[in-house]
Structure formats: structure tokens, C-alpha cells
Image (cartoon, rainbow, N blue to C red):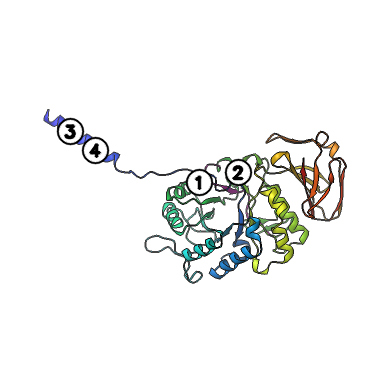
Amino acid sequence: MKKITTTLLMFSFSLIAFSQGNTHKQETGKFEGLANTPPMGWNSWNTFETHIDEKLVKETADIMVASGMKDAGYTYIVLDDGWMTRERDKNGNLVPDPIKFPSGMKALVDYVHSKGLKFGLYNCAGTKTCAGYPGTRGYEYQDARFYASLNIDFLKYDWCNTEGINAKEAYTTMSNALKTAGKPIVFSLCEWGDNQPWNWGKPIGNLWRISGDISPCFDCEDNHGTWSSWGFMKIIDMRKDIRKFSGPDHWNDFDMMEIGNGMTFAEDKSHFAMWAMMASPLIAGNDFRKMSKETLSILINKELIAVNQDALGIQGFKYADENGLETWVKPLSDGNWAITFLNRSDVAKKVNFDWSKNTIKDIDFGHELNPSKTVYKLKDLWKNKDVGTTKKAFIADLASHDVITLKLTK
């Protein structure tokens, strides 16, 4: 009897000890509501790659404010790969490069915040980043606490050096780590679409890349041997039937923009119009210090930005394609629509769109544009002028690789 009592007591103490072994609550899921419209801002990679420093960030922040970009909605400054040293410290912590950032990363974050902007950093799900800096594999919760201590607002999380890792599990772990650390941070899944993140990313991240890296060209492929980067129209064509997965706080990300990085003015306009139509995040990738007035005029076109930021949050779709003259449509709030005519060909085209003969149905979200029943006013969003109504056919000349975007208002 004594033996039984002793055994029961020992068992009871074991249960108590086991139940008290881990009292810390692990949070799960992303921070909700941080990106109810597509994020807007700037990322360093397209122009600077790993050649980044404190001076560049401060100058970029200053220009975002002075140029009107902040007022137009550009909020985030995101430092991409190369901001840390090549090795972690003895405690396993990431170390911001003291040569590139002599005042320290926290001071730089505070500077950006003082301008009314938000700050983002980059890392990778693998053992190393794409440029060979320390990745996050095995350090997810430690790194999340570090980001929270810096008070950052955005994390871009890449997919290099991830052999043997399950993508959904890796991104879920980092998402949970950010949530547990407690600082609301937009989580950008940069997985390139290889594992179809649109199928599983909504509870994990606020946006997810759908392709490999973009190139500053209209419709090209830059083959780098083991991988390719893509012109912006190639990226738009790359994924079929994924628009239904995109919406407020869970966006299909078509990559950072290449506007101002060497394409023609018409191509830059088309690039911006299509990112607006696709409800993609608007993350500029050019050098603001060398930005032309023409480039700035594209980036701060408030009418196009309003199409991108529309509260309905629906990604547009291609309605028609006639010998390279494409018609793209996007349902907007209040029953309004945006329509973009894009000349993909190498020769000028004539747009002649008879509204009475076109009833447009959005089969994914149930919207319908029927101009034969409802008359809409037309506004050219590039010229910022009214151009009639849907009572008459819309007729216009359209140069090669150029674009016309109209807003249809009831």
C-alpha cells in the first residue's frame, strides 16, 4: 500500500512538472489587416543589389517626402539583401554591417520613422541569403525578436539555399515567429511561386511573389544559366487562374517595379498601368536621386494609384487580345471599372472599342460591366481628362508598347 501511494504521488508530481514545462504561449498566423491595400514603397535590390548604406537610405527617405511620393502613398523603405555582416555573432544574432550602417540599424529605422515612413528588412528561409549572407533557417524566433527590437514594419523573406525544406512549413514557422515576437510586421513571402503560395499563403503572409525576379524590359527573358529574370509582361503572363486568390491583406506580388531603369517612357507607363490593374504591390526599384521628372510623373499618378489601391481589392484580368492589342479590365468600388488598352505589338494600333457590343463578366468575383444597360463616363487616367461616355465607341491611336487607361464611372 505504501509503495502504491508513493508511486501515485511521484506520478502526480510528474504530471505537474510536465504541465509547467512550457508556459509560453506561441502565437500563430500573420498580423491581420496590415495590408488591406497593396503595399507601396521602395526596395533597394533592383538598382543597388548589396551596395547599400546608411546614406542611401536617408537620401531616399528625404526624396520620398520632398518629391510627393509619400503624399501619393509610398510608405515603405525596404533594405534588401546585404545589410548584415557575413557571419552571426557569438550568440547567433544577426549583425547589421557597421561599415555600411555606422550609426546602427536602430538609428536608421528611427530616422525613417521620423519622416512618417515605414522601414523593412530582408532575409531568407534558407541557410544563406541569395547573396551569401546569414539566412534564417534554425534562427526564426531569434531573428523575429531582433526585428521586433529594431521596430521594423516589413519583412521580405526569400527562398534561396532551401534544399530539403518544405516551403509552407518554413514560411509558417517564420510567420508564427513574427507573431510571437509581438511587433506587427508585414510579411512578404518571396518564394517565386514555385510552390504555389497562393494556395496556402493567406493565413501566413500579407503578400507573396508569383514569379522569379523582374528585369527592366517589356517582354524579354534574361537567362542566367540556372535561372531567368523576366520582363514585366512575361511575369503577367506567367500564372493562370490565380487572381481569385488575391485580395485585401493577401496579395499576388508581381515583384518590384523597374520604372526609371532603362525602358522607354511608353514601356514605363505600361508597366505602371499593369501593376495598378493587377493590384500588385507598388514597390519602386529605381534610384530616386537620379529620377527624371517623367519617371516621377508616372510613379505619382494619383489616378492610377487609386486604381491599384481601390478598396474592393480585385485583381484585373485580360478580356480581349486582337493581334497584340490587349484589353484588360478591373472591377472597382461602387460599380465602377478600370479598362486598359495595351499595345503589345511593335507597330502602332488603332483602338476602336464599341461599348454596346461588349458585356464583360468577371467569373471569379461575380461582377458585370454592361454598357448597353448602364451609361458610364470615361476618364483618361494618363491625360487626366474626360473623354466622353460609353454611348459612343472609344477610338484612339496607340503607339507600340504604350497604354491607355480609362476609368468608367457610373
Q: Are marks 3 and 2 in contact (CB under 8 Å)?
A: no
For label 4, the residue is 14
The x and y percentages for residue 383 are 80, 55
Q: Quick check: 10 left or right of 290? A: left
Kind of residue indicated by mark 4: Ser
Label 3 close to label 1 by CB (< 8 Å) = no
Q: Position of residue 176 (x, y in %)?
A: 46, 46
- Residue 317 drawn above or below residue 126: above
Q: Which residues are magenta?
A: 202-215
For label 2, the crowd category at 10 Å Cα-Cα, with few meaning under 14, some 14 to 19 and many 20 or more, is many
Q: CA distance from mark 3 to mark 2?
A: 57 Å
Could you say whether the residue bearing mark 3 is in a helix, strand or loop?
A: helix
Q: How many marks?
A: 4
Considering the numbered disc 1 on the image, is that residue within a helix, a strand or a loop? loop
Per the image, label 4 sits on a secondary structure element best described as helix
Can residue 228 be seen? no
Confirm whether residue 111 shows in the render: yes
Residue tagged 1: 31
